[in-house]
Image (spheres, rainbow, N blue to C red):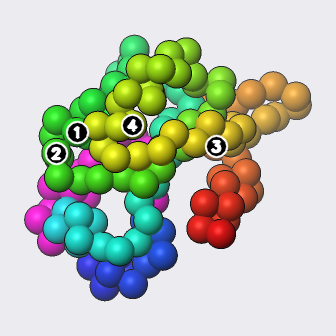
């Protein structure tokens, strides 16, 4: 995993369960240190909806405040958020600055039968990642 981070063009955190899937990797010193040192671009994809029982009531800026408090030396290049999750854009832009990131607002939520789902569309995310790398 460390070699993959060292050789990556982009490292993506999320989407996923914040406290049980995204952050735990950063508690592993070698992974944390590799993420801090890598020349790769670092992207956080904010969940399109809070996870019941884990991040209930979280706003997108709360994820970043939590990251900045828990891992103050982890920097990001971009934070990707779906506009449907964006209730507090200025607070989110301020939180992005805490981690050195630029806010990217893109439609990345999956639709089913014309209705939004609680998950990301992998092709839309891939398209965003490609544009960010270009």
Identify whether 70 is placed above or below 33: above
Q: Is residue 26 above or below residue 47?
A: below
C-beta proximity under 8 Å, tags 3 and 1: no
Which residue corresponds to mark 4? 96
Q: Are marks 3 and 2 in contact (CB under 8 Å)?
A: no
Tell us which disc is closer to us: 4 or 1. Answer: 4
- Categorize mark 2 by other alpha carbons within 10 Å: few (<14), some (14-19), many (20+): few
For the residues marked 2 and 4, what is the alpha-carbon distance in whole angstroms? 13 Å
Nearest-to-viewer mark from 3 and 2: 2
Task: Tell me the CA gap for discs 4 and 3.
Answer: 21 Å
Q: Quadrant of the C terminus?
A: bottom right
Question: Label 1 belongs to which residue?
Answer: 68
Tell me the magenta residue range. 12-30
Count residues near mark 3 (Cα–Cα under 10 Å), then give few for <14, some for 14-19, many for 20+.
many
Earlier-in-chain disc, 4 versus 1: 1
The foreground one among 97 and 122 is: 97
Q: Earlier in the sequence, mark 3 or mark 1?
A: 1
Quarter of the image for the N terminus: give it. Answer: bottom left
Asked if marks 2 and 1 touch (Cβ < 8 Å), the reply is yes
Query: Callout 4: few (<14), some (14-19), or many (20+) C-alpha neighbours within 10 Å?
Result: many
Q: CA distance from mark 4 to mark 1?
A: 10 Å
Image: 20 above or below 29: above
Decide whether the magenta segment is chiefly helix, strand or loop: helix
Q: Is residue 16 magenta?
A: yes
Q: Which residue is mark 3?
A: 120
| C-alpha gap between disc 3 and disc 2 | 27 Å
Q: Earlier in the sequence, mark 4 or mark 3?
A: 4
Q: Is residue 5 left or right of residue 66?
A: right
Q: Position of residue 56 (x, y in %)?
A: 39, 18
Which mark, by number, is residue 72?
A: 2
> In the rendering, at what x and y percent does residue 9 appear?
48, 76
């Amino acid at each position: 995993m460390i070699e993959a981070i060292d050789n990556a063009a982009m490292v993506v955190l999320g989407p996923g369960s914040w406290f049980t899937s995204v952050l735990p990797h950063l508690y592993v010193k070698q992974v944390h240190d590799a993420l801090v040192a890598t020349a790769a671009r670092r992207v956080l994809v904010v969940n399109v909806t809070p996870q019941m029982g884990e991040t209930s009531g979280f706003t997108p800026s709360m994820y970043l405040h939590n990251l900045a408090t828990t891992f103050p030396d982890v920097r990001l290049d971009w934070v990707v958020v779906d506009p449907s999750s964006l209730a507090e854009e200025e607070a989110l832009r301020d939180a992005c600055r805490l981690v050195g990131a630029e806010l990217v607002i893109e439609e990345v939520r999956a639709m089913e039968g014309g209705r939004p789902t609680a998950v990301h569309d992998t092709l839309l995310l891939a398209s965003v990642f490609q544009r960010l790398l270009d």
